[in-house]
Image (cartoon, helix red, strand yellow):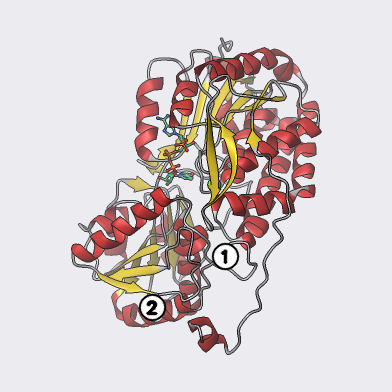
Amino acid sequence: MTTKAQELSGWEYSLAPETTKIDIEQKNKLFIQGKFVSPKSRSWFSTINPATEEKLADVACAGKADVESAVTAAKKALPKWSRLSGSQRAKYLYRIARRIQERSRELAILETMDGGKPIKESRDVDLPLVAQHFFYYAGWADKMQYAFPGANIEPVGVCAQIIPWNFPLMMAAWKLAPALACGNTCILKPAETTSLTALRLAEIMQEVGLPEGVVNILTGAGETGKLLAEHKSVNKVAFTGSTAVGKSLMRSTAGTGKKLTLELGGKSANIIFADAAIDQAVEGIVSGIYFNQGHVCCAGSRLFVEEPILDEVVSKLTHRLRSLRVGNPLDKNTDLGAINSQEQLDTVERYIRNGTEEGAQLHEIHSERLPSKGYWCSPCFFTDVQPSHTIAREEIFGPVLSVMTFRTPQEAISRANNSPYGLAAGIWTNKGSKIFEVAKKLDAGVVWCNTYNKFDAASPFGGFKESGFGREGGMQGLRPYVRLQNQSRRAK
Ligand code: NAP
Ligand code: MG
């Protein structure tokens, strides 16, 4: 059978599956005090490959007693770790970064198997950024006085770090690297559907000889995260995930003296002006929303097109989507992998139905290559979208784009800002002056110009409004992990 991709390209790619020959422990234990230990809760859950629905392994589900052990370990390790010189801490971080590079192929494959993202993303985007993050903060560890000149700098203490499933290792690196550089000790709680690579990171902590208890990894459910964040000996909670859970953490940490940073959801706007290089813009729009199946908090899920070029953009978008390859995430040719879980697929499909019911026009791009098992969603977009439509307001977290129009830059700005979120935005134009004028008026933590979804460890990332507060990455990413002179307080 001839596929759309074949029609367009004229030839078919050979299959290029990545090997899956990596050993996966059948029982994945908790990492506490430098050792892998069975959960005191005696509770386990299965993790599956969302592309095949095959069970990969059992993972420990940490309960109250396990949280207690991990917090005790982190508290015990704190005095010695925080008193090490910055250059000594840096050595550990450099070693971690180098070991990640050495094991990057294995980590990328496991990330893809457990989470469903295409191997070319985990291999070429996630893993290089994970290593880069550790290298970058290793560089800061002995230069803190330049980040906060004249201040007496102290670590915050024991940090509870709770992360989501869309970039499991990258989120772990974003949390752990700055915290460790600043002399804190950590308990990391990965998401339930993607725990396996965090546990390989634990192995790396052992391999580099990181002192026991400095990093502890607690796999488990939402309840594990809740118990951890509410523990009285935790001095700082760093959370990336949904706005609903973020709000509950704000309530539970209020008045406790705990520091809190939240990286939450988004409904980011990509604005394309008529004077933009349209082919380049369409390419950026496609990567902005369909990258990682749309499981990206800063995904450009609302597209605002200047009215005269709507037809051209829609036609080029359709053409480009037809050439995307959806399927086996371990195949090096795959552009879109599997949706992370049945639950997330149900959510995305519910939004797609809702979009049609509310009157928007669905443009589906059917892929003939979808495997028969697993959680799949072909990329799609909606036109005739009103700002009041649910698909234009709520985060879908899937490969679904809402296309809307505008007539003036002012209208583009006000429509883009008409959202409870404020994480990211994109501007496409060939006029530099328009970029500066529009960018400064957008309520977004990150504004990309003539590009989208570009990350660098040196660049701070974070949102406004309901997208959260606090910054990760860059020099700014150190700030949540230190207490400065006038607010310094010994961690209890
Ligand atoms: P989620 O349900 O909020 O889960 C995030 C993490 O919190 C998971 O480890 C989860 O554990 C844990 N958790 C769940 N309930 C909790 C509770 N009551 N207290 C403490 N921890 C709890 O979010 P998700 O569905 O996994 O991730 C998708 C969301 O994350 C999207 O809204 C997305 O925009 C956002 N996100 C934001 C960024 C950013 O940088 N701004 C980055 C990535 C994702 P379980 O997995 O066991 O439920
Ligand atoms: Mg999984």
The residue under the point 72% across, 19% down is: 81
2 or 1: tag closer to the N-terminus: 2
| Horizontal arrangement in the rendering, residue 112 relative to residue 77 (left or right) | left
Residue position for label 2: 313
| Horizontal arrangement in the rendering, residue 5 relative to residue 467 (left or right) | right
The residue under the point 57% across, 42% down is: 171
Regarding residue 430, the answer to whether it shows in the image is no
Labelled pair 2, 1 in contact (Cβ < 8 Å): no
Q: Position of residue 12 (x, y in %)?
A: 60, 83
Regarding residue 317, the answer to whether it shows in the image is yes
Q: Nearer the viewer, residue 122 or 411?
A: 122
Q: Please count the marks in the image.
A: 2
The CA span between labels 2 and 1 is: 29 Å
The residue under the point 38% across, 65% down is: 271
Q: Nearer the viewer, residue 44 or 485?
A: 44
Q: Position of residue 348 (x, y in %)?
A: 36, 56
Report which quarter residue 44 is drawn in.
top right
Q: Is mark 2 within 8 Å of ligand 1?
A: no
Whether residue 22 is situated above or below residue 7 in the rendered picture: above
Binning the other alpha carbons within 10 Å of mark 1 as few (below 14), some (14 to 19) or many (20 upward) gives many
Whether residue 169 is situated above or below residue 301 in the rendered picture: above
Question: Which secondary structure lies at badge 1?
Answer: loop
The residue under the point 55% across, 40% down is: 472
Q: Position of residue 72 (x, y in %)?
A: 61, 13
The amino acid at mark 1 is: Asn
Question: Which secondary structure lies at badge 2?
Answer: helix
